[in-house]
Amino acid sequence: MKKLITTLLISMFPVVELRGGIPFAIAAGFKPLEAMIICLIGNIIPVPFIMIFIKDIFKFLKKKSPKLRGTIERYENKLHEKAAKVRKYGPIGLMLFVAIPLPGTGAWTGAFIASLLEIRMKIAIPMIFLGLIIAGALITLGCMGIIAL
């Protein structure tokens, strides 16, 4: 049970997400498919909350902390650059963006971008989840030595 909870938490953590959660879960003794499923669940849980609250959180933090203002604004600018690529292809672009298992392209960033582009949750969440399935499959196959990433 401890391994399961740890794996879920790792896959929820920004930056780490599936890319770190799946290898951790496999190393912890889960079968590859189990590892992928656990990490998919863990990685999708924060998505609706991010989409609902991120704009307000950023707004609050920029107002309350001048030190964080510059950092948040730089991050928002990066998100806008990434969002331009996603905007070009719409929801399919969001799915493809999340599907690329590289740093800065996971569910968290996808949810931020969906929020910025005001993609409705009933469209964004399934697209993000499909992207996670693709990324999860690639990472799992890479961990199994079937493909090289």
Image (cartoon, rainbow, N blue to C red):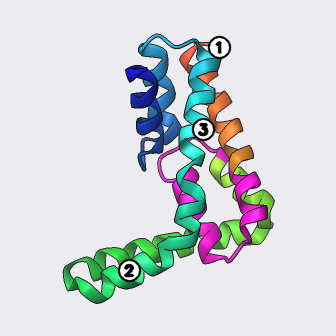
Decide if residue 10 is on the left or right side of residue 128.
left
Location of the C terminus by quadrant is top right
50 over 62 or under it: above or below:
above
**Which residue lies under the disc numbered 2?**
73
Residue 105 visible in the picture: no
Residue occupied by mark 1: 146
Task: Give how far apart the Cα atoms at labels 3 and 1 are.
Answer: 23 Å
* Camera-side residue of 60 and 70: 60
Kindly report which numbered mark, 3 or 1, lies closer to the viewer in this rendering.
3
Which residue appears at 58% of the width and 67% of the height?
A: 51
Of mark 2 and mark 1, the one earlier in the sequence is 2
Q: Which amino acid does label 3 sit on?
A: Ile
Amino acid type, residue under disc 2 in the picture: Glu
Q: Nearer the viewer, mark 2 or mark 3?
A: 3
Whether residue 59 is visible: yes
User: What is the secondary structure assignment of the residue under circle 3?
Assistant: helix
Q: Where is residue 138 in the image (x, y as percent from the top left)?
A: 65, 29
